[in-house]
Image (cartoon, grey):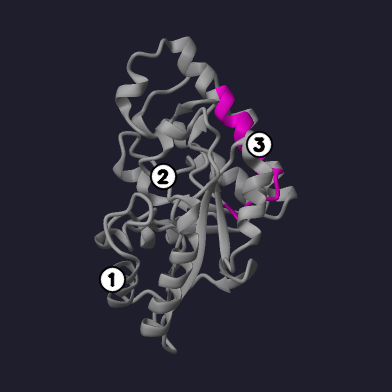
Amino acid sequence: MSQIRTYHNHTTFSDGHNSMLELFQAAKAAGLREIGVSDHCSVVPESCRPKASAWQMDTARLDEYCAQFAQAKAQLEDENFSVRLGLEIDYFPETLEENRQLVRQYPFDYVIGSVHFAGTFPVDTSSDLWKPLSQEQIDDVYRVYWQSLKELANSGLADIIAHLDLPKKFNFRPTWDYTAVACEVLQDIAANDLALEINTAGWYKDCQEQYPALPLLQQAAKLKIPLLANPDAHEVQYVLRGIPEGRQMIRDLGYSTTVAFAKRRRLNIPLVD
């Protein structure tokens, strides 16, 4: 029986292309042991709302989201297959407390924390938004992004930190070396006992590299940060995309365990397929 679990996946509740039931059915057919749904849902500040509306679930739909999860769970779970209820929530300093309160209202098994905005600039929406930027502006986007990520790591908002070096998605790179500040963020992740994902979707983007880059993963391993491989699937055919390779990367970094989640508790489990 497969022991593969993934937790970063999206449905039509946010920017995915398939229903929650279709996602879970595809995961079960692919032989996963467990899959979690983690649609985007956050209280977004007014300054970012127009740019986030296309991929953020309205918070008013969370009751429906949880109800649909319960129905799919009752229909599909058995002794060999489980589903988990999660959420991907964005860090915004202006709405941090509102998002903390939002998370507390629902029975999530885990919460993924992410940063998609550097200030009001959406870092992963389109390469067309990056093309007009000067190199100085690109450098500034990375500076603001990493500061926001540091704040996220210390916010108490999430259990898992997503796609650590996301701004590289379209392969617009800064002239300054962000390794030192990224290592500070990793130290904060370790200090707050958070898990870190290897997001395999990066292999299929312009950057052609998992998030985060290998040197950052090596530093995470030195800090003994728990790792898990996630596909960031937005379509059902991607529920396993890159996951065997991502799990092998975790082994190559010296780990013998990965993690599972239930009711906001993290469990260490053997890294076997």
Which mark sits nearer the N-terminus, 2 or 1? 1
Q: Is-magenta flag for residue 46?
A: no
* Residue 95 position by quadrant: top right
Distance of mark 3 from mark 2, alpha carbons? 20 Å
Determine which of the numbered discs, if any, sits on residue 59 in the image.
Answer: none
Q: Residue at x 48, y 37 (%)?
A: 116
Q: From this viewpoint, which residue is outermost toward the left?
A: 237
The secondary structure that dominates the magenta segment is: helix
* Residue 195 position by quadrant: bottom right
Disc 3 element: helix
Q: Residue at x 40, y 71 (%)?
A: 68
Q: In this picture, which residue range is highlighted in magenta?
A: 143-160
Drawn side of residue 30 relative to residue 104, left or right? left
The C terminus, quarter of image: bottom left
Amino acid, disc 1? Ala
Q: From this viewpoint, which residue is outermost toward the bottom?
A: 79
Residue underneath mark 3: 150
Q: Nearer the viewer, mark 3 or mark 2?
A: 3
Distance of mark 2 from mark 1, alpha carbons? 23 Å
- How many numbered marks, from 0 up? 3
Determine which of the numbered discs, if any, sits on residue 26 in the image.
Answer: 1
